[in-house]
Amino acid sequence: MAKADSRVASDPSRQAVIIAALRTPVCRANGRLQHLRAGDLLAPVLAALVEDAGVDPALVDDVIIGNAVGGGGNVARFAALQAGFPVSVPGVTIDRQCGSGLDAISMAARLVAAGGSPLFIAGGVESVSTAPARANRNDDGGLDFYSRASFVPSDFGDPDMGVAAENVARHFGIDRERQDAYALESHRRAVASAVAGRFEGEIVPLASAGTTVAQDDGPRKSLNPSLMARFPAAFVSGGTVTAANSCFDADAASAVVVTSLHRARSMGAQDALLVLDCDTAGVDPELLGIGAAHAAKRLLAHADLSAGDVDLVEFNEAFASQTIACLDQLGIDPAAANLEGGALALGHAYGASGAVLVTRLMSQARHRYHSGGAESLGLAMISIAGGMGTSALLRYARL
């Protein structure tokens, strides 16, 4: 832990910290949140965050939000106004696909490190249910609709996500048995955490279609090994990646308040996640699922840490194959990651998922400390379409 302390900025006005983190329920696409557009998901989180942190919205320097498949129009600005922020507060929306939410937080942290003790709200949002149809315009003016954008030039392969997950499984020797067992454990942990009320303090309930949605709807307690084994290969004939050991598309929003350590203390914040460092790496697009491991390796090396120094690991479980492969590459026991379940059970809301990881880390670190544990060192990681990965190293501390 002392090694991690050496990464903290010596000037508290430049040390980025996260003092509040919240999310919506994560719900299956075309399900309980299907009537809510991206702004409808995000605005309640923004409003709840400033209240939770005791921040006057007029003092927010910028709202930085990641989004992957939305309709453009700068959802960060739209949602900030929808949340009741004054017109003086700007907003910017960024797109690094699945990594967008974590990269938005990284961007805010780096802006704090540049000086001036600013205050940002950063995170991500995705309404897969209401994402617009997309089309290229042909020479004759006609529209050629497509299901997803191209992430890299075709000569780099540009595989679909499921095919890339099969590539990783085959390349790294991750068999079907390991994938199914990991996915089943993710559901088991998420169900147990929900029953114990572990998610309640981080979730902002949403009004949707005349009801209040306050819980994730993905975790399945009915899953068992025999049921998992019945699922056929979903993407490649004879493959090992199935619908049961893959995530499902989801709708959600998550965001955090990022400021300097100096300003957090002056505001009376009691605790925070110190953003020690962030990194993004590029990898072979054919093996895009391994991107998070490359980013995390560089991050840990820069901090003079090993994976064994990390207390809490949150990895976006898009597919069991790539999750296991990344953890193996880092020397992290899969049993020690995503202790309360991950995206295999909760779902993957694209641009929001990286911010959900950070919110989950803060919730777990607080619980660990108040249960008699020490201040935790956390690692958030996400692999990204096009062959990339982003990671962030954070330390929970009492202020």
Image (cartoon, grey):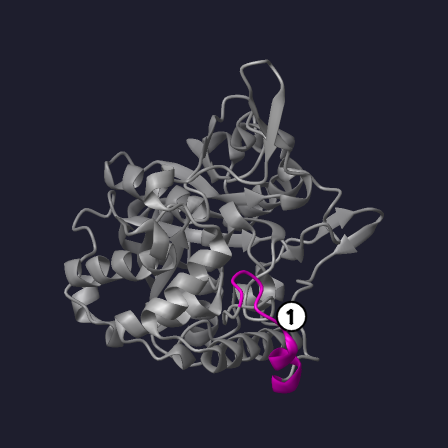
Quadrant location, the N terminus: bottom left
**Outermost front residue:** 237
Q: Residue at x 59, y 30 (%)?
A: 71
Do we see residue 20 in this rendering?
Answer: no
Residue 219 picture location, percent across and down? 64, 70
Element marked by disc 1: loop
In the picture provided, is 15 more to the left or to the right than 24?
left
**What residue would you read off at disc 1?**
219
Depth check, front residue: 189 or 142: 142
Q: Residue at x 52, y 33 (%)?
A: 76
At label 1, the amino acid type is Pro
* Residue 381, placed above or below residue 121: below
In the picture provided, is 132 more to the left or to the right than 305?
right
* Residue 84, placed above or below residue 245: above
Q: Which residues are magenta?
A: 225-237
Residue 104 picture location, percent across and down? 40, 42
Residue 357 picture location, percent across and down? 46, 59
